[in-house]
Image (cartoon, rainbow, N blue to C red):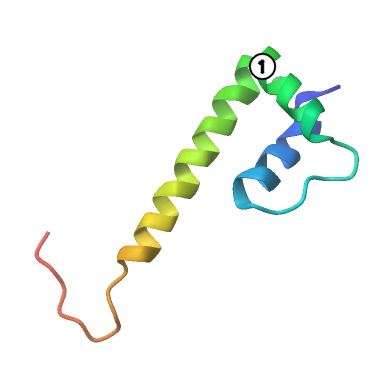
Amino acid sequence: MACNHFRSAISARATGTPLPATVTEQALDHHLTSCLSCSRWSKHLTTLRAATDDILRRRRPAGAPQEPV
Ligand SMILES: [Zn+2]
């Protein structure tokens, strides 16, 4: 199965949405262990997702003074 077929499933997993009906959890796990490219992409997405969540958690309330950078 082609990588781009799994990329949408990887993206779905990273964002906590259900996998596409054509890709099972097992198939995705198997592909991630056998495909370095998708494995790296998955890690990248997960890292990005964690960073985004972190930024959203830290977002200051509207009207708060900006911290010096
Ligand atoms: Zn792949």
Secondary structure found at label 1: helix
**Residue 57's spot in the image, x, y percent?**
36, 64
> In front here: 13 or 8?
13
Q: Is residue 69 left or right of residue 48?
A: left
**Residue 21's spot in the image, x, y percent?**
89, 44
Q: Which image quarter: residue 64?
A: bottom left
Q: Is residue 14 left or right of residue 2?
A: left
**Residue 45's spot in the image, x, y percent?**
54, 39
Above or below: residue 62 compared with residue 57:
below
Q: In which quarter of the image is the N terminus?
A: top right
Q: Name the residue furthest left.
A: 68
Seen at 13% across and 68% down, the residue is 67
Few, some or many residues within 10 Å of mark 1 (<14, 14–19, 20+) = few
Q: Name the residue furthest right.
A: 22
Seen at 49% across and 48% down, the residue is 49
Quadrant hosting ligand 1: top right
Q: Is mark 1 within 8 Å of ligand 1?
A: no
Seen at 78% across and 34% down, the residue is 25
Q: In which quarter of the image is the C terminus?
A: bottom left
Q: Which image quarter: residue 68?
A: bottom left
Q: Is residue 24 left or right of residue 40?
A: right
**Residue 7's spot in the image, x, y percent?**
71, 35
Above or below: residue 48 compared with residue 60:
above
Q: Mark 1 points at which residue?
A: 33
Seen at 58% across and 30% down, the residue is 41
Q: How many marks?
A: 1
Q: Name the residue furthest front.
A: 26
Kind of residue sitting beneath label 1: Thr
Q: Name the residue furthest bottom.
A: 63
Above or below: residue 46 compared with residue 31:
below
